[in-house]
Image (cartoon, rainbow, N blue to C red):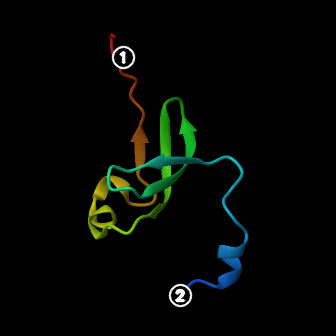
Amino acid sequence: MIFYTPEPFDLFSQGAPVNTVMLKLPSGGHILAEPCEYNKLRVLNVVSTEPMDFLNSRYQPGNIIELQTTFQSQ
């Protein structure tokens, strides 16, 4: 795999920050996010093979995702 980026490679070799969460996307990719407030996460990175995940404005780095709890009865 060839990875082209304007960022120095040293930034990628440090790994993910310690306090992060990975959220699975419906397409099979995932979002790397950090907690910022109660029930809210700030998007850090999108990792996916689906191009539409990168075009979705909700998943862009810096955006805040609000977590919602739902209950299902059995």
Q: Residue at x 44, y 48 (%)?
A: 24
In this rendering, is residue 6 above or below 56?
Answer: below
Label 2, residues with CA under 10 Å away: few <14, some 14-19, many ≥20: few
Image coordinates of residue 59 in percent, x first then y, are: 37, 55
Q: Which SS class for mark 1?
A: loop
Of residues 27 and 16, which is closer to you in this image? 27
In this rendering, is residue 16 above or below 73?
Answer: below
Residues under numbered marks 2 and 1 in contact, where contact means CB atoms less than 8 Å apart: no
In this rendering, is residue 49 above or below 22?
Answer: below
Q: Residue at x 69, y 65 (%)?
A: 15
Label 1, residues with CA under 10 Å away: few <14, some 14-19, many ≥20: few
Q: CA distance from mark 2 to mark 1?
A: 44 Å
Going by the picture, which residue comes out furthest to the top? 73
In the picture, the disc for residue 71 is 1
24 left or right of 1 in image: left
Disc 2 designates what residue? 6
Amino acid under disc 2: Pro
Of residues 55 and 73, which is closer to you in this image? 73
Q: Residue at x 36, y 21 (%)?
A: 70
Q: Residue at x 32, y 56 (%)?
A: 27
Q: Quadrant of the C terminus?
A: top left
Residue 69 falls in which quadrant of the image?
Answer: top left
Q: Which SS class for mark 2?
A: loop
Number of numbered discs overlaid on the protein picture: 2
Image coordinates of residue 65 in percent, x first then y, are: 41, 43
Amino acid under disc 1: Phe
Image coordinates of residue 45 in percent, x first then y, are: 49, 62
